Amino acid sequence: MIAVENILRERIFNKERIVDLLNADANESKFIFEEAARIKKKYIGNKVHLRGLIELTNKCSKNCFYCGIASSNKKINRYCLSMDEIERAIKFTDDNNYGSIVIQSGELQSEEFVSYVEKILHKIVEISWGRLGVTLSCGEQSEDTYRRWREAGAHRYLLRIESSDENHYYKLHPKNAKHNFQTRINAIKSLKETGYQTGTGVMIGSPFQTIENLADDLLFMRDLDIDMCGMGPYIEHEDTPLFQYKNICFSKEDRLQLSLKMIAILRIMMKDINIASTTAMQTLVNGGREMALKAGANILMPNTTPSNYRENYSLYKNKPGMDEEAEDSKQSIETLIERAGYEVAYSEKGNAKHYYNRLVSSAV
Ligand code: SAH
């Protein structure tokens, strides 16, 4: 094993070295976090960009083994927000100058769903006069759907690979046509080709995952040259098949440290991408999102879903902000950004600098 300081100085991020970094103890991790903070300051600055998050629907056609809204979970009420409810959330996000909006949902491919999202996108452009940046996180879709949504106003898309190791992927998902590993990778590539700022990510500390898997995940993101990343700790959910493995997962403390190190190493490897400080960080520990910002993340997503629906969008248990109105979430988000030593970037879309740099370098 090579000392962390040497790896950071030499800047060779191959699998072996990344594994060393992920295995760093608390004393050595300090150097990783300091380097990530230095790079973030230089390439991103002191601002944190916001994305008002709307959880459009918990209806889902898939059966991912970790996810609380998988279609086999009969214990939750299924909802889809009405256009009125969505309009209110859009107005809230725009009135509060959040700068961007994210629409997240279960995975549905029906024409009814595709055209509903299209209508919502038109509404966002209309209400905000194009002021709001728009990210979608609505799963795998055909290239045609991605194009329709792009034309309707979406310009960023997050589709997590969840695990970049095919064997591990099938420990987290059923092995069938609906959950095909290669199809998911192709979907990420087709998002890039359709012109989206493209994001992916993984769950950290999921059952059967190894440190080597996580190192490969980081290399996967670098090789795919992604613009954005959303990754966070795996949180067990009692109404899912993977719950039975809760005793063989990494401990909560290990998941926290690994998540922070994954963010920091990715920031060092891919300096100008957008990295989200995810809700799952906060679920794992109080103050988790603040820690993620300090480790290299630069994006926060206040939840603007009407509070009466939030408990039904429980991807995992104990999600924070469940009982809060959007206004309260806004307050707490601002406080946490300031506490972490950063500034809220109001009224800015906060596009990924990497996207522009990527376009420029492919043009020369
Ligand atoms: N279905 C959409 C997005 C909805 S879920 C899609 O696949 O793009 C958003 C993310 O929540 C998922 O990508 C997954 O990484 C995360 N998630 C789901 N269940 C989780 C759990 N039990 N613990 C931690 N993260 C989870």
Image (cartoon, helix red, strand yellow):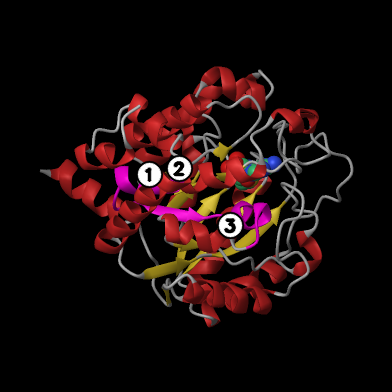
Tell me, for residue 266, which label it has, or none.
Answer: 1
Tell me, for residue 103, which label it has, or none.
Answer: 3
Q: Quadrant of the C terminus?
A: top left
User: Residue at (28%, 42%) from the top-left corner?
Assistant: 5
Tell me, for residue 134, which label it has, or none.
Answer: none
Amino acid under disc 2? Met
Residue 95 is situated, as x and y percent measured from the top left of the image, at 54, 82
* Lateral position of residue 85 relative to residue 118, left or right: right
The residue mark sitting in front, 1 or 3, is: 1
Residue 142 is situated, as x and y percent measured from the top left of the image, at 52, 35
User: Residue at (58%, 22%) from the top-left corner?
Assistant: 168
Q: Specify whether residue 274 is painted magenta.
A: yes
- Front-most of 343 and 103? 343
Q: Quadrant of the N terminus?
A: top left
Q: Secondary structure at mark 1?
A: helix
| Gap between marks 2 and 1 measured at Cα | 6 Å
| Gap between marks 1 and 3 measured at Cα | 25 Å
Q: Earlier in the sequence, mark 1 or mark 3?
A: 3
In the displayed orientation, state which residue is furthest to the bottom. 95
* Lateral position of residue 235 relative to residue 28, left or right: right
Q: Quadrant of ligand 1?
A: top right
Residue 261 is situated, as x and y percent measured from the top left of the image, at 45, 45
Residue that mark 2 sits on: 262
Q: In this view of the protein, can residue 111 be seen by the observer?
A: no
Amino acid under disc 3? Ile
Q: Secondary structure at mark 2?
A: helix
